[in-house]
Image (cartoon, rainbow, N blue to C red):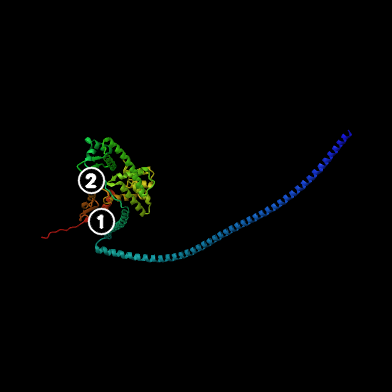
Amino acid sequence: MEPTILYIIIGVAALILGIVAGKFIFAKNTQKQIQEAELQSQTILKEAELRAETIKKEKALEAKEKFVQMKAEHDREVLERTKKLSESENRARQKEQSINQKESNLDKQIKENEAIKENLNRQIEVVNQKRTELEKHQEEHIRRLEKIAGLSAEEAKAQLVESLKNEAQTQALSLQQEIIEEAKQKAGKEARKIVIQTIQRTAAEQTIENTVTVFNLESDEIKGQIIGREGRNIRAIEAATGVDLIVDDTPEAILLSSFDPLRREVARLSLQRLVSDGRIHPARIEEVVEKTRKQLEEQVMEIGERTAIELGIHGLHKELIRMVGRMRFRSSYGQNLLMHSRETANLCAIMASELGLNPKLAKRAGLLHDIGKVPDEETELSHALLGAKLAEKYGENPAVVNAIGAHHDEMEMQYVISPIVQACDAISGARPGARREIMQQYLQRIKDLENLAMGYPGVEKAYAIQAGRELRVIVEAEKVTDSESDKLSFEMAQKIQTEMVYPGQIKVTVIREKRAVNVAR
């Protein structure tokens, strides 16, 4: 037992000793860690102080730079304000000097006006005195004249007024005629210049459209095939195309007669296909005519597009392009409508350029001015109003719409290009060889011209010559004086211009001749 207790005591003593040693070692390590922590904290503090110092210096520098910048801006603003104040002071000083100068000049002018006024008052007094003396002399002179002439002053005044009135009328008519002639010469020169330049630049060929198309054949034997048994083929062609086929003794030719060029073209192309194919019978005729009609519609669109491209007109509606293409197969007074519209468009562009206006807009209006002549459906409206309605429907410019509707004075002209389109339309139609009117219309216009002239008093005879381009009037010498003949020609020209419709211009010539005839026996 004693050894066991001894071991226990030794173990307890060793344990105590270990605990004491462990505490000692732990305390030593703890002390070391504390020292290291203190050293580390001192290092951190030094770094923080250095960093703080650096930041402090940086902020101080930034603050200094900001201060310098703000000071510079303030100095600049002060300089600008000082400059503006100086300029204002200079302007005020100059204005004050100007006002002082004006006041000085005004005072000087007032003094001069007062001097002039005094001088005028003196002159007025002198004039009044002379007027009084003149009136006395005039009264005495009038009394002497009345005594010599045996007329009162009122009677003499009436005779003098009448004489002066007649003389003034004669001089006025002469001056009026001179002014009109001079204006006509100047206007004629300018108009001829523009028209000649325009025609030279456009140089469009004019083709007179007929109501008959000649279809040439290789031989007369084909005529029998076209006619068919008992005329069935020719009746089928006429029914399908609406064109009259005239088969006569003309060798190797058939006449296609219709007022509509489009129908004649369909019939011509259909006959050409049928003759080339050799199969000519009613069923085949209807098929070929239908195909030809569709092909021609495509050709119409192609013609319209090509025309718009050649004229440099863009943005036209498809329906308007189609109508432009259809103009190729329409005529007006024998003049091809598309050729007329192209020429009018070119004329409008050149005239608009000469006048400083928009040539593209004028050209557009010139091309479309007659689209009312190619409607899809017949209407009671005139072609000008119908064309304006169609142009407005398809989104054209209001100036173009007004020019179309007003080119025959059926609508009020609201834009500058409207009279240009009207003038160019007349120029294109009035060119020699451009149009061919119906004989009855031509004869009626000639008769109307002569009747208009015969309606004036003193007119003995009237003749319309030069195809209605000149009206020659013979007056009675006893009833019409030379000055009245000038007045008569002017009034006739004005009346023709306002009341009649005619192509080109009409020259009015009044002839007054006095013949004295005696016989020596």
Quarter of the figure that contains the C terminus: bottom left
| Any part of residue 403 in sight | no
Q: Position of residue 302 (x, y in %)?
A: 34, 44
Q: Position of residue 134 (x, y in %)?
A: 33, 65
**Which residue type does callout 2 highlight?**
Gln
- Secondary structure under tag 1 reads helix
Relative to 114, say whether 405 is above or below: above
Outermost top residue = 1
Identify the residue position indicated by label 1 in the image.
Answer: 486
Mark nearest the camera among 2 and 1 is 2
Relative to 88, say whether 234 is above or below: above
- Residue plotted at (34% across, 51% down): 346
- Secondary structure under tag 2 reads helix
Corner quadrant of residue 16: top right
Identify the residue position indicated by label 2 in the image.
Answer: 440
Residue nearest the viewer, comparing 60 with 93: 60
- Residue plotted at (22% across, 56% down): 511
Residue nearest the viewer, comparing 413 with 354: 354
Q: Position of residue 359 (x, y in %)?
A: 37, 51
Q: Earlier in the sequence, mark 2 or mark 1?
A: 2
Outermost right residue = 2
